[in-house]
């Protein structure tokens, strides 16, 4: 889930008719910074633009700014009750807040988030990302909270009617999460054959291939071998898409090919659609593979000075990766500071908590 200069990215929207504004494509394809800047441009021209408030909320949720995201979603629904994009935005924000809280009171937030997601697709059955998010929520939530594989697969079927490859992707993810890798593979294969350039499909497949459930099905050696080989196979059509490069590099890291991952990310940096995400990926490679650590620190420092693309865990994740590198370099005081900065941004960040415990232990 490096920086593009805002001056280059913010479109000139003020002269465009409001009816021309449609943020769904950017949000569906992980272009969260662009969606955020576009929404802010719309709101500057018209503070009562409900869809722009909803789009801003979804973009902020991807940046782990969940409380701000909920406020924007509430504003959207106040301006336009029944707005499908507003329900989706509020559901995502409520889910993000519940994840951060991680306590019994968060169960109410999860239930409210599920209600919002259902309301979103009821209000607009053509809301593709609504079906995707709802399907994943159904699969991950216990039955006590309304989750079930059957309901998740129904969402995949609804999504397939709107976007065949994305529907197949969702079905593959659901089946793999259910421990049914052999059933999931054909759906992933069909999605990739139909849309090999879709970075979200590449990301979803490689993420599922690297999961614990898939490890149980394949065994660790075979899983690692396939992660590396599939990453190489899927790279060419998504070389210019940061989300695809991130997925490929993460799979190569899991396949213990850190140097290859580093070289791919470095080669992608000059031509990528989201330099912030590729710089973050380079920092992650340096932290996980213990290579090019000084250069990795420099990339992370740049990430922390500028807007970071959504879907990465936000600046909290960048501080955590920086702390990991500093720890390996023996700069423990600086590593403690980095871990603390990560936890200030995301108090529930598990990686930063572990790092802090290691440094203080």
Image (cartoon, helix red, strand yellow):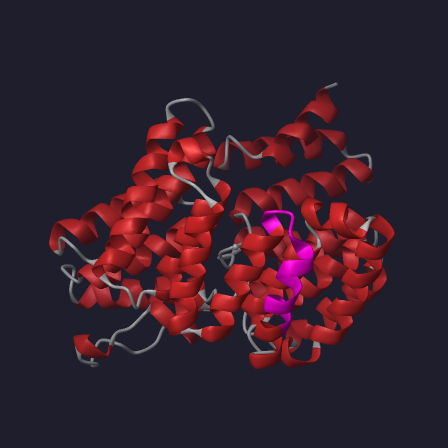
Quarter holding residue 233: bottom right
Quarter holding residue 20: bottom left
Range of magenta residues: 177-189
User: In the image as oriented, which residue stretches furthest toward the top?
Assistant: 361
Residue 187 painted magenta? yes
Against 91, is 196 above or below? below
Against 173, is 267 above or below? below
* Magenta stretch, main secondary structure class: helix
Query: Which of 142 and 104 lies nearest the eye of the viewer?
Result: 142
Q: Which quadrant, please, contains the C terminus?
A: top right
The image position of residue 336, as x and y in percent, is 67, 29
The image position of residue 99, as x and y in percent, is 46, 36
Q: Residue at x 30, y 38 (%)?
A: 112
Q: Residue at x 51, y 57 (%)?
A: 308
The image position of residue 128, as x and y in percent, is 37, 66
Q: Is residue 302 left or right of residue 217?
A: left
Quarter holding residue 292: bottom right
């Amino acid at each position: 889930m490096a920086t593009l200069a805002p001056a280059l990215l913010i479109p000139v929207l003020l002269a465009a008719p409001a009816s021309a504004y449609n943020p769904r494509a950017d949000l569906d394809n992980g272009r969260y910074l662009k969606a955020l800047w576009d929404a802010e441009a719309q709101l500057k021209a018209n503070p009562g633009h409900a869809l722009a408030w909803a789009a801003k909320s979804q973009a902020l949720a991807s940046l782990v700014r969940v409380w701000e995201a909920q406020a924007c979603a509430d504003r959207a629904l106040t301006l336009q009750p029944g707005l499908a994009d507003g329900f989706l935005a509020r559901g995502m924000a409520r889910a993000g807040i519940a994840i951060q809280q991680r306590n019994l009171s968060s169960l109410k937030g999860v239930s409210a988030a599920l209600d919002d997601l259902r309301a979103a697709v009821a209000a607009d059955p053509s809301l593709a990302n609504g079906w995707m998010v709802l399907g994943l929520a159904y699969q991950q939530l216990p039955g006590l909270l309304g989750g079930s594989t059957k309901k998740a697969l129904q969402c995949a079927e609804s999504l397939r009617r709107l976007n065949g490859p994305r529907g197949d992707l969702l079905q593959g993810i659901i089946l793999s999460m259910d421990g049914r890798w052999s059933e999931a593979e054909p759906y992933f294969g069909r999605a990739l054959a139909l849309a090999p350039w879709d970075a979200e499909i590449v990301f979803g497949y490689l993420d599922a291939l690297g999961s614990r459930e898939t490890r149980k099905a394949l065994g660790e050696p075979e899983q690692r071998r396939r992660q590396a080989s599939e990453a190489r196979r899927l790279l060419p059509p998504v070389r210019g898409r940061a989300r695809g490069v991130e997925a490929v590099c993460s799979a190569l890291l899991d396949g213990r090919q850190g140097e290859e991952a580093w070289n791919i990310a470095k080669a992608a940096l000059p031509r990528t659609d989201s330099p912030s995400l590729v710089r973050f990926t380079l920092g992650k490679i340096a932290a996980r593979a213990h290579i090019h650590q000084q250069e990795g620190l420099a990339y992370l420092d740049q990430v922390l000075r500028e807007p970071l693309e959504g879907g990465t865990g936000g600046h909290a994740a960048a501080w955590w990766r920086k702390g990991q590198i500093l720890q390996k370099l023996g700069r423990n005081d600086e590593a403690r500071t980095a871990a603390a900065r990560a936890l200030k941004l995301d108090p529930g960040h598990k990686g930063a908590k572990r790092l802090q415990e290691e440094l203080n232990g």
